[in-house]
Image: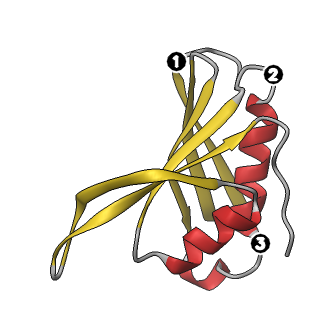
Amino acid sequence: MGEEGRDYTLVADIAGVVSGFVVCQCVVGELSVHNVAVAPGAQRQGLASSLLRRAIAEAGKEAQRCLLEVRASNAPALALYRRLGFGEDGRRPNYYPCAGGREDAVLMSLESGAERERA
């Protein structure tokens, strides 16, 4: 993760199969998480939290804060981020398109050194 302003991808490989990834960027002391994905068959096994913890740890020297946004309807992701210590900073109304029109993006952040998983 060392270069400022560069995107990084961390990949989880299980038995030669890409099972998850996180894409992030460290700019001006902030780590922005752009995408976290885990294959359906590998979900609910701690892969997303492991990837996020690793990204946060690797950016730790450069980033004082980690930022992300998530669909308001994505309850599993919201629960994961809260377990890791992320707090809600606000919302972007009508940000994501969805079947019923549009839904809010929940803006979340984690201060450096605050990462923890309670469950």
Q: Which residue is mark 1?
A: 5
Q: Mark 3 falls on what kind of element?
A: loop
Q: CA distance from mark 1 to mark 3?
A: 28 Å
- Residues under labels 3 and 2: Cα distance? 24 Å
Give percent across and percent down for residue 82.
Answer: 68, 65
Q: Position of residue 16 (x, y in %)?
A: 71, 64
Q: CA distance from mark 2 to mark 1?
A: 14 Å
Q: Residue 106: where, in percent of width, then height?
A: 43, 59
The residue closer to the viewer here, 94 or 41, is: 94
Q: Residue flagged by tag 3: what amino acid is it?
A: Gly
Which amino acid type corresponds to the residue marked 2 in the rendered image?
Lys
At label 1, the amino acid type is: Gly
Pointer 3 residue: 46
Q: Quadrant of the C terminus?
A: bottom right
Mark nearer the N terminus (1 vs 3): 1
Q: Which of the 4 image quadrants contains residue 80? A: bottom right
Furthest toward the left, the residue is: 101
Dot 2 alpha-carbon crowd within 10 angstroms: few under 14, some 14 to 19, many 20 or more: few
Relative vertical location of residue 102 with respect to residue 1 in this rendering, above or below:
below
Tell me which numbered mark, 3 or 2, is placed earlier along the sequence: 3
Q: Mark 3–mark 2 contact, CB under 8 Å? A: no
Q: Quadrant of the N terminus?
A: top right
Q: Secondary structure at mark 2?
A: loop
Query: What's the mark number on residue 61?
Result: 2
